[in-house]
Amino acid sequence: MNTNEMFSAVEIELKKQTARLDAPHTKSFYDMLTYHMGWTGAGAGSTATGKRVRPILVLLSASGCGADWRLALPAAAAVELVHNFSLAHDDIQDNSPKRRGRDAAWVKWGAPMAINVGDALFVLSNQAIMDLKKNFSAEVVVAAAEILHNTCLDLTRGQYLDMSYEGRSDLGVDDYWRMIGGKTSALIAACCHIGATLGDADEEKQQAYRSFGHYLGLAFQVQDDILGIWGDEKTTGKSAASDLIEKKNSLPVLIGLEKKGKFAKRWAQGAIAPDEIGEIARLLANEGGLLGAQDAAKQMTDLALSALRSANPQGEAGEMLLRLTKRLLGRQQ
């Protein structure tokens, strides 16, 4: 068992699930979906598909509880379809022209068509989770589906907060945690919770897995915020200027604003030009934004690892979950 084997199995399952949409009279619609998934079009391939971390977490969590991970593939596909549904809509709502280095679906086909692609992915996720009925009891299938559906509602709450925060100057660190708890962490927590549910774990162990995913998601987002300002573009693949230019209310920024120093004064003055980025990033670091965010990332990482120890995943899956966690949270600036 290895993550490459799981990744290949996930891709096969995803293509099987999305093939429901493949019909002659709507072929171009299906092509839009396969483009968004990273399988077709210019630049298709591993960079365009992403790492499929969420479905891998489902499979490892199920395996860590003693289940055959292959039987959990419909659930793994379901969470990845939900993730991609949210990305298709987020790109439109955030006016983001690129997705993993390629034109976003809305740029290629317009917002109305891209919204429909997202809608299709959401429906397909619901169909995928129901395929668990081939290998699991009705009770287990309903429990897994309920986790997924509740999480989708959390995603909409998180996205609402994210959009409603734009342009606001009265936000604090507590507001940030509420937002990323829904927007980023909820689905990762659900992946681990669903996996444990399919592994027939008891309630205490299910909650340990869910906590692991929750804190893993929080730590990952904080680290992403750090890289979005101080990261090496050649290493991260994203511009370190964009988060400041777009005036994102990321954790380092909110920490800096609470200091009410020079950074906060410049932030309140309005738009930031590209040639100011280096100086403003240094100013934010000097006023505690970098160190404060690093401390928060470490705290969330420690909580994730503590929850993983409590979950006590068995066998090779346990070792793989630990390695995956360290790899996700070990990205370099």
Image (cartoon, rainbow, N blue to C red):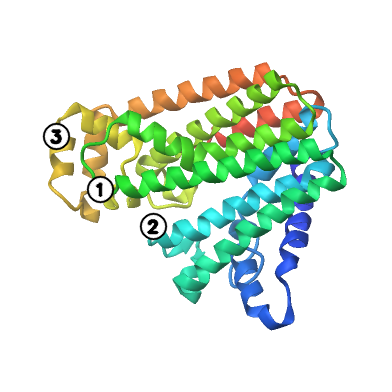
> Which residue shows up at 24% across the image and 49% down it?
167
- Which residue has dot 3 on it? 262
Kindly tell me whether residue 186 is visible in this rendering.
yes
| Quarter of the figure with residue 94 | bottom left
> Which residue shows up at 52% across the image and 25% down it?
301
What x and y, as percent, mark residue 239? 39, 52
Query: Looking at the figure, which quarter contains the C terminus?
Result: top left
Name the residue type under label 3. Lys
Name the residue type under label 1. Ile
Does residue 212 appear left or right of residue 271 in this picture? right
Task: Assign a secondary structure to mark 1.
Answer: helix
137 above or below 92? above
> Which residue shows up at 31% across the image and 42% down it?
249
Task: Assign a secondary structure to mark 3.
Answer: helix
Q: Nearer the viewer, mark 1 or mark 3?
A: 3
Kindly tell me whether residue 333 is visible in this rendering.
no
Q: CA distance from mark 3 to mark 2?
A: 28 Å
What x and y, as percent, mark residue 217? 53, 35
Q: Which mark is residue 277?
A: 1
Q: CA distance from mark 1 to mark 2?
A: 21 Å
